[in-house]
Amino acid sequence: MDYGEKVFVFEEVAKRKERDDCWLLISGKVYDVTQFLEDHPGGDEVLLAASGKDATQDFEDVGHSDDARNMMKKYYIGEVDSTTVPPPNKIKPQTDSVTQKDDEPGFLFKILQFLVPLWILGLAFGFQFLGKKEKTEA
């Protein structure tokens, strides 16, 4: 297909995530990689997993060669309207207080694992001592 210099809304790019129709959004540019799926050195699953979203970070994390970047020009079909792209989901680093809250049930469970057997052992010794005391009094 010849798209020319076209501007796409994100929703249009995001729905193109099938083997027979696969587009990628990388650095604000849209690429129709459908014909490249079988030839991609990392396999088609990598491209399919990166479709339907902004794949810029996925692309940059791999560290593609200059040849790979030049090859992208062949699949370029247009730009994305940046106002239609949802903000990236930022992973918030856990703070100590959040970690402590997450660990509280685990900590309580560990304490109970230690205290319950001690309590049972204490009861067993208590009943044994009480039983011996009653025999000596009789």
Image (cartoon, rainbow, N blue to C red):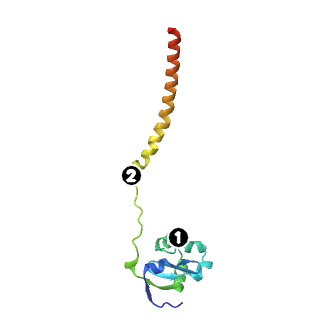
Give percent across and percent down for residue 109: 47, 41
Res 114 label: none
Tell me how many marks there are. Answer: 2
Instruction: Determine which residue is flagged by label 2.
Output: 98
| Residue 89 sits in quarter | bottom left
In the rendered image, the vertical position of residue 117 relative to residue 77, given as above or below: above
Q: Residue at x 50, y 85 (%)?
A: 76
| Residue 6 sits in quarter | bottom left
Q: Residue furthest front?
A: 138
Bin the neighbour count of mark 1 within 10 Å (Cα to Cα): few under 14, some 14-19, many 20 and up. Answer: few
Q: Which of marks 2 and 1 is nearer the N terminus?
A: 1
Give percent across and percent down for residue 113: 50, 37
Q: Residue at x 49, y 75 (%)?
A: 52
Q: State the quadrant of the N terminus.
A: bottom right
Give percent across and percent down for residue 23: 52, 80
Bin the neighbour count of mark 2 within 10 Å (Cα to Cα): few under 14, some 14-19, many 20 and up. Answer: few
Amino acid on which the number 2 mark rests in the picture: Val
Instruction: Determine which residue is flagged by label 1.
Output: 62
Q: Residue at x 47, y 80 (%)?
A: 13
Do tag 2 and tag 1 residues touch (Cβ < 8 Å)? no
In the rendered image, the vertical position of residue 113 relative to residue 133, given as above or below: below
Give percent across and percent down for residue 74: 54, 86
Amino acid on which the number 1 mark rests in the picture: Val
Q: Which residue lies furthest to the right in this view?
A: 38
What distance separates the C-alpha of mark 2 from that of mark 1? 31 Å
